[in-house]
Image (cartoon, grey):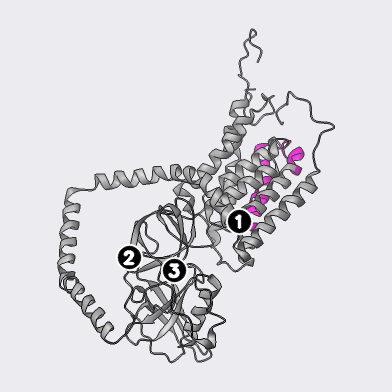
């Protein structure tokens, strides 16, 4: 059988700069003008969740906190809003990571959905508690889209770690 | 499965327990949230982070502005000519009023001097380009391309060609955040042009405004124009703010519910003018001296607005 990105083939070790690059790219994607369209995913939440599942020793609550601070300032929201949601997201995905990766991708996405949804819900609750206007139900479409993006995100973010399918005996790696 | 790491897992050096870390970060986040919301004393932190984020944000905005530019470039000659002739027409229409404005202002000044009334403040300002809308879905704010470097300070009002757009609420080194008048509970002291009633108009957060504290039998009609009353240290008097679109009079409540839409293109992108801050108001009369002491302060401002509402 042809190994695919969803099968349990052995991966190369991750490169730290790629994790850093992907997180910064997610931040940049969040800054695009398209971010105002209803249902646009929160890329940072998705990528952060992915890396805290895959590489919980490298990406965790510290990264979540810093990225949350960046997003708070960039969004013009109250400081601490994204921080809180992202830190909780990173914590829960880290603690789920041992279990999550045993499942096929579609089921992984299904298990990740409540986490992403929770991150969005926490932010809404925090702001509603201090008297903001309800932003409308389209605000909660974003986590659903993020869930659907889990599979393509897994493919893209693991690309640098795949070994070639045909191995050259002279170059084993 | 997770990638096989070539380094062995750290057996002895594990750092703090996850739960301890979680508690630590959650505590900091909540502290930040409360301090930012209640005391608004984290502006320096915000400004320094904004300085880091700003270049990335501007780069991310370039594709959009390039598309805009291309669309403008490809716009037909005929459309441009049409627009040009319409603009000329509009200018000619307003010419009689505009040409006499200088003379009227001079006359007004002279008359005010004769009556020993304080002279009207002149409205000067600087044009700023709206860069993007803040992504926060809970508020209505835009970011403009002028900041501390151009001498913008928090509290300055912003207008466009039709009326009041909002107020500068935060200033960063190279940009400033303008809270639109449609933001929830953003208040503008206004006056109804037709009847001269004074009140305060509040944003509702859904693109509309509400004129509060008007008695159920108040003389307000659909189509009334509201202009700034100048009863605060922020807005100069006379700028159009909103137009009344819907009035609900219910005798069960002592106040009528009056809904308005902004006159200015509040949700549009484009250029706006950030007006210079007003000169400080004369000291408040003695009976309320304890309340109106600090003019620049937000709390003082809110009390002023309340007073303006009460005086009605």
Alpha carbon separation for disc pair 3 and 2: 20 Å
Residue B7 badge: none
Between disc 3 and disc 2, whose residue precedes? Answer: 2
Q: In x, y percent, where is residue B289?
A: 54, 83
For the record, the magenta segment spans A95-123
Q: Are marks 1 and 3 on the same chain?
A: no
Q: Chain of mark 1?
A: A
Considering only vertical position in the picture, is B188 above or below A125? below
- Kindly state the secondary structure of the residue where label 2 is placed: loop
Which residue is identified by label 2?
A: B124
Q: Is residue B59 left or right of residue B25?
A: left
Examine the structure image and report whether residue A113 is included in the region drawn in magenta.
Answer: yes
Alpha carbon separation for disc pair 1 and 3: 22 Å
Most foreground residue, B310 or A128: B310
Considering only vertical position in the picture, is B118 above or below B207? below
Q: In x, y percent, where is residue B38?
A: 63, 66
Most foreground residue, B114 or B45: B114
Alpha carbon separation for disc pair 1 and 2: 33 Å
Considering only vertical position in the picture, is A75 above or below A157? below
Which residue is identified by label 1?
A: A79
Residue B181 badge: 3
Q: Is residue A61 left or right of residue B61?
A: right
Quarter of the image holding residue B239?
bottom left
Viewer can see residue A41 = no
């Amino acid at each position: 059988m042809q190994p695919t990105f969803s099968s349990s083939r052995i991966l190369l070790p991750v490169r730290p700069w790629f994790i850093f690059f992907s997180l910064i790219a997610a931040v940049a994607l969040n800054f695009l003008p398209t971010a105002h369209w209803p249902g646009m995913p929160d890329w940072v939440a998705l990528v952060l969740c992915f890396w805290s599942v895959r590489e919980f020793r490298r990406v965790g609550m510290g990264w979540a906190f810093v990225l949350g601070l960046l997003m708070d300032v960039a969004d013009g929201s109250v400081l601490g809003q994204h921080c809180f949601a992202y830190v909780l997201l990173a914590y829960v995905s880290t603690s789920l990571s041992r279990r999550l990766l045993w499942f096929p991708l579609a089921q992984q996405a299904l298990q990740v959905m409540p986490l992403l949804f929770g991150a969005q819900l926490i932010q809404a609750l925090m702001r509603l508690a201090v008297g903001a206007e309800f932003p409308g139900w389209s605000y909660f479409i974003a986590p659903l889209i993020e869930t659907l993006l889990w599979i393509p995100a897994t493919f893209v973010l693991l690309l640098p770690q795949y070994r070639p399918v045909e191995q050259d005996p002279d170059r084993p790696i | 499965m997770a990638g096989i790491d070539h380094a062995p897992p750290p057996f002895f050096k594990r750092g703090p327990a996850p739960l301890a870390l979680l508690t630590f970060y959650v505590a900091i986040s909540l502290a930040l949230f409360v301090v930012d919301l209640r005391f608004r004393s984290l502006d320096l932190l915000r400004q320094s982070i904004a300085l880091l984020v700003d270049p990335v944000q501007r780069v991310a905005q370039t594709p959009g502005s390039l598309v805009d530019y291309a669309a403008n470039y490809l716009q037909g000659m005929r459309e441009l000519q049409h627009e040009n002739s319409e603009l000329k027409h509009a200018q000619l229409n307003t010419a009689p009023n505009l040409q006499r404005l200088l003379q009227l202002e001079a006359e007004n000044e002279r008359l005010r001097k004769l009556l020993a009334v304080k002279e009207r403040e002149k409205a000067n300002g600087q044009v700023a380009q709206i860069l993007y809308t803040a992504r926060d879905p809970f508020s209505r704010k835009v970011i403009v391309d002028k900041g501390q470097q151009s001498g913008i300070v928090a509290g300055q009002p912003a207008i466009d060609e039709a009326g009041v757009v909002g107020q500068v609420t935060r200033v960063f080194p190279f940009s400033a955040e303008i809270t639109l008048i449609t933001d929830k509970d953003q208040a503008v002291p206004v006056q109804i042009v037709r009847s001269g009633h004074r009140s305060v108009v509040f944003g509702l957060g859904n693109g509309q405004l509400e004129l509060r504290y008007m008695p159920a039998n108040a003389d307000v009609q659909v189509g009334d124009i509201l202009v700034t009353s100048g009863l605060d240290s922020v807005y100069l008097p006379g700028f159009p703010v909103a137009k009344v679109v819907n009035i609900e009079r219910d005798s069960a409540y002592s106040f009528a519910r009056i809904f308005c839409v902004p006159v200015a293109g509040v949700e549009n992108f484009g250029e706006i003018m950030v007006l210079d801050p007003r000169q400080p108001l004369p000291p408040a009369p003695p009976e309320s001296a304890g309340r109106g002491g600090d003019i620049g302060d937000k709390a003082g401002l809110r009390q002023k607005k309340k007073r303006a509402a009460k005086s009605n």
